[in-house]
Image: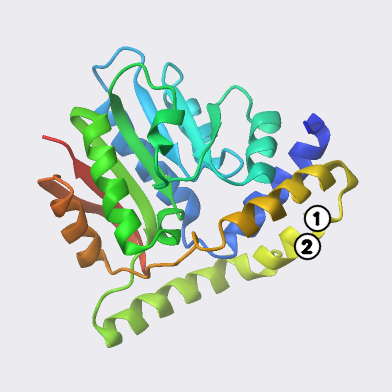
Amino acid sequence: MGVSMGTARLWVERWELQQQHYATAREERFEVIGDVVEHVVAHQDRPLVLDLGCGPGSLASRLTGRIPDAEIVAVDMDPVLLELGRAHHADAARYVDAVIGNSGWTGTLGLDRPLDAVVSTTALHYLSEQTLLRTYRQLERLLRPGGALVNGDHFAPADRRCAELTAHVGRRQAERSRAHDHENWEAWWSAAAGDPELAELFDLREERQAALAHYRNDNDLTLARHVELLGRAGFRRITPVWQFGDSHVLVALRD
């Protein structure tokens, strides 16, 4: 069910534009995540990085450009996005098909040493709070001492008026950058589903989604709640390092 490089390039390039429709200051957030990983792995030979919810390799490809000697394991459960990543960003990562948080998922990663960093961007909000806590605990055990979990996502403040303000700032930035001129999530998936070269992958995707209908359960957790869950998972040094609107980069360091 592999796809040609030309097809993969087409849909990944459209994916990048589509993501700008939602992710405030997306490229800056990627840069900050790269800054954190660079700092954490500065004295490591062959640093090992896990990319959670990798999609078509957007973050992995940027990290490879920043840290060319890093080994990146990129995991996702979507067969369409994984195959696009394997074809378009083949050298960026070793791609793994796994359901984050499911029983035994870490055993499918093929890790031969502790992780130096775990990264994710706009992916972990799909996990229920209970699954997220379990996943944080698993990742804390997989990281080496001094390693970092770096999560870039949208975290609204608990206070309603503050949440309205951060959401407004994000919307205004999107309007100024004309990000809303790009196709949205639904339009991208609808168009990609019409590509005959992706038909078998979409059939597999539909089977996967039906089997995992219980899995997606957006948690809408606040920044403070994420910090609390990370603390319960064993992390003692937790800090946001960047914010624009309600978009954050949150870092947890393993002792």
* Horizontal side, residue 147 vs residue 177: left or right: left
Seen at 50% across and 63% down, the residue is 214
Above or below for 45 versus 103? above
Residue pointed to by mark 2: 190
Q: Say how many tags the image has.
A: 2
Q: Is residue 184 visible?
A: no
Q: Are marks 1 and 2 in contact (CB under 8 Å)?
A: yes
Residue 225 x/y as whole percent: 22, 65
Res 4 → quadrant: top right
Q: Quadrant of the C terminus?
A: top left
Q: Circle 1 sits in a helix, a strand or a loop, which is it?
A: helix
User: 137 and 231: which one is in front?
Assistant: 137
> Given the current orientation, which residue lies at the most extreme right position?
196
80 and 46: which is toward the camera: 80
Q: Residue at x 63, y 38 (%)?
A: 82
Residue 208 makes an appearance in the image: yes
Label drawn at residue 193: 1
Q: Quadrant of the N terminus?
A: top right
The amino acid pointed to by label 1 is: Ala
Q: Amino acid at mark 2?
A: Ser
Cα distance between the residues tagged 1 and 2: 5 Å
Picture coordinates of residue 63 (x, y %)?
45, 32
Label 2, residues with CA under 10 Å away: few <14, some 14-19, many ≥20? few
Report helix, strand or loop for mark 2.
Answer: helix
The disc at residue 68 is: none
Q: Residue at x 38, y 22 (%)?
A: 111
Choose top left, top right, bottom left or bottom right for residue 127: bottom left
